[in-house]
Image (spheres, rainbow, N blue to C red):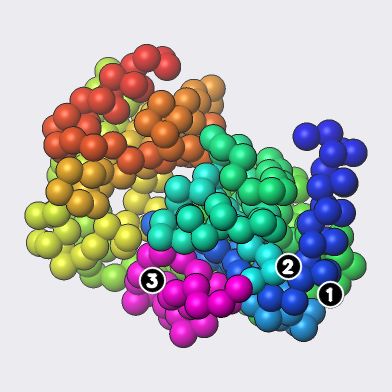
Amino acid sequence: MTKTQIDKTFNKIIEKINTAKSIAVFAHVNYDPDGLGSMYALTTFLRKQKKKVDMFVDSKITELDARFFDTSKISTEIEKEYDLMIMVDTPNINRLGKYASAFKNHPNTIRLDHHAGLFNDAKIELTLPYTSACEVVLELIERMNCNLDKTTATYLYAGILTDTDGFLIETVNKQTMQNVLKLIECGADSHKANDMLIKTQTLSQFNLVKKMAEKLEIYDGDIAISSLNTKDFKQANAKPNQCGNFANKLIYIDGVKISCLIKQEQNNIFSCSLRAKAPYNVAKIAEKFNGGGHVLASACKIKGTEKSVKQKILEAIREIK
């Protein structure tokens, strides 16, 4: 999008928000803290603008994440009409889960995101090349000439922190750090976010990391693939949504250029978290399987057995090398 197009889109979004009295905000299934952070931040901000706002995410929040994100504030069923619906950090409508049809059929919808996405699912689409969706929400708030409160700033900081893996990923730049500084100056509780979302892990998660290491396979000297199945989760007393940033651990292995963590979600459905180092583009792999994401970090779901899914991913990786 050109600067003029971005300005016009922001103006349309602000007009929609200003005229709406009731708003529903959605994050994606298999949430991450950027999805929750942008949803909670936008909701907190809009409520301070005297809007009636409800939040929705079709995933169960883990006990650890619930210490940071108050789950009592999340609605489970759409039981009323809304003037406006907004999805954040969601590349396509399918990732809204059970709320996808309601969003699709609503006359006033907005997508705020930093993923390119495969479809134009909202009436107004705004995708900006930030490292996190929280930065898109931050720019929206700034363009509305409104002050950031501490709570909103903390949620936004949390999203940027986690989606950059503690500011370690290659896409972190000057703009990223300038936005972080703005949030800290507005009172963002960076220590709380750092401690609860980056430094802390449960014993179950620790056991999952060990299992992931045991099942790690290196192909062609620079491709790392590991997988976690239902049995692995049971032995670790954990669930697939507790994997957090595990996928990043594989790409950090010395010499690895492309990696994938494969997680069993149902009997024959596996989620695949792809990571890469420049100049490789794993978004192409995710899109092949109707997924999406960034050049260096993308995801998709594939049907099959653990062995067949691993083979499909390996073949797809080799195709882009």
Q: Nearer the viewer, residue 110 or 319?
A: 110
The quarter holding residue 170 reads top right
Left or right, 293 with respect to 65, comes to right
Q: CA distance from mark 1 to mark 2?
A: 11 Å
Q: Nearer the viewer, mark 3 or mark 2?
A: 3
Question: Between residues 13 and 81, which one lies in front from this camera angle?
Answer: 81
| Helix, strand or loop at mark 1 | loop
User: In the visual, does 265 lie left or right of 259?
Assistant: left
Question: In the figure, 294 relative to 264: above or below?
Answer: above
Q: Is residue 266 visible?
A: yes
Task: Tell me the mark number nearer the camera, choosing from 1 and 2.
Answer: 1
| Residue designated by label 2 | 183
Q: Which residues are magenta?
A: 54-81
For label 1, the residue is 147
In what element is the residue under mark 3?
loop
The answer to if 74 sits in the magenta stretch is yes
Q: Amino acid at mark 2?
A: Leu
- 190 vs 116, nearest the viewer: 116
Mark 1 or mark 2, which has the lower sequence index?
1
> For the point 28% across and 37% down, which residue is it?
302
Q: Residue at x 38, y 71 (%)?
A: 61
- Quadrant where the C terminus sits is top left
Cα separation, mark 3 vs mark 2, equals 25 Å
- Provide the major secondary structure of the magenta segment: loop
Q: Could you tell me residue 316's position as x and y percent? A: 34, 21
